[in-house]
Image: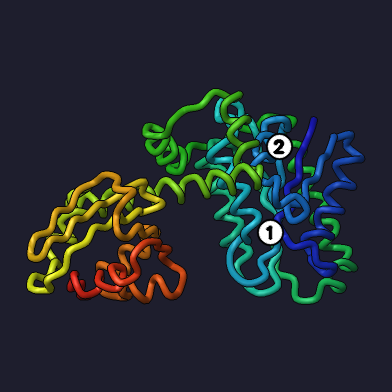
Amino acid sequence: MKINIYYGGRGVVDDPAIFVLEKIQEVLSELNVTVERYNLYEQRTQITALSQTVTEADGIILATTVEWLGMGGYMQMFLDSCWLYADKSKINNVYMFPVVMSKTYGEREVSLSLINSWEMIGGKNGNGISAYVDDTTEFEFNEKYIEMIEKKTEDMYRTISQKRICLPSSSQTIKNNVMKDVVKFTPQESEQLSKYASDDTFVKTQKQDIESLASIYKEMLTEQEQGGDNYYINIFKDNFKTGVGFTGTYMIIISDKDKNITMNVDGDNLDVEFGENKSADVIAKLSKDIFEDIVSGRVTFHRAFMTGDMTAKGNFRSLRMLDELFAFQG
């Protein structure tokens, strides 16, 4: 027989759950049970991958201490991983025994949460241990408490060895209904996914890729709402001021959009199109963000040039005229 212990506390010295687990391990060792213990706080970067270990055991103990409210983040993360990645075809044969200590309030509520969670995942439940501990030292030296822990541990052993059946529960029905719409993976796929999910570098890279794609799609949608490529042409046409009496040519390069806008100003006439004009009076280069700042009226062409946000070469008198030729307003 093999039993895995998953401890979800923080490992503090006076944690009563640690004392209870030590007593449980002593009894199981005397019964020739193979015990493997995982301290989740020590393996927090590998919690997702630990979900693959539950089906290696005949039974598991989920242990935690209620320090404030609920089962704690490590245990919740572990259960989430079991729901997502554990082999459901094998987990229905694994017994779970909750061990929940509390120094405040809520040991029974958390114990019930663990039971409901394990039923939802698909496993079997056995009778566990829960208690409120006001004074850890007094608790550890109470012979009656120790005797009770030992007897409950022996009952855990008998539950597994006798393969005691569990009466059906509504949690199983909910689980079956929920799982209808869940993508089913093979055990090999689940194991591989759990390894990916527990790899911080992989997860970080994936998040960056997702953020990058989201930014690109958001930008594409914004441009589409603004009129697509025509936006860059129309923004100049719509804000062109007549009566200035100026003649000149421009090429504006939007560096991160791979777009070159050429303009030919002849008095009250303006021609704008995409293309190149390397002989233009002014060739300016700026990013899309700075371009948006200018056409929304937040900064001027002159200010962008002076702060270095826009580079330009050519006739600087013609460069200064850009702010006279276009009336961009916020």
Measuring 47% from the left and 28% from the top, which residue is drawn there? Answer: 184
Instruction: Give the CA separation, mark 1 to mark 2.
Output: 17 Å
Q: Check disc 1 and report the residue beneath it.
A: 100
Label 1: which secondary element: strand
Name the one closer to the observer, 227 or 315. 315
Q: Residues within 10 Å of mark 1 (few under 14, many from 20)?
A: many
Name the one closer to the observer, 242 or 135. 242
Precedes in sequence: disc 1 or disc 2: 2
Q: Position of residue 285 (x, y in %)?
A: 39, 58
Measuring 78% from the left and 53% from the top, which residue is drawn there? Answer: 42
Q: Position of residue 223 (x, y in %)?
A: 25, 52
Label 2: which secondary element: strand
Q: Position of residue 251 (x, y in %)?
A: 30, 54
Image quadrant where one finds the C terminus: bottom left
Q: Check disc 2 and report the residue beneath it.
A: 59
Report if residue 97 is visible in the image. yes
Q: Residue type at mark 1?
A: Val
Tally of numbered discs: 2
Name the one closer to the observer, 35 or 38. 38
Q: Left or right? Give the position of 66 relative to 253.
A: right
Image quadrant where one finds the N terminus: top right
Q: Left or right? Give the position of 269 relative to 24.
A: left
Name the one closer to the observer, 61 or 68. 68
Q: Residue type at mark 2?
A: Gly
Q: Left or right? Give the position of 35 relative to 61.
A: right
Picture quadrant where residue 32 is located? top right
Above/below status of 311 relative to 151: below
Report if residue 226 is visible in the image. no
Q: Left or right? Give the position of 23 relative to 87.
A: right
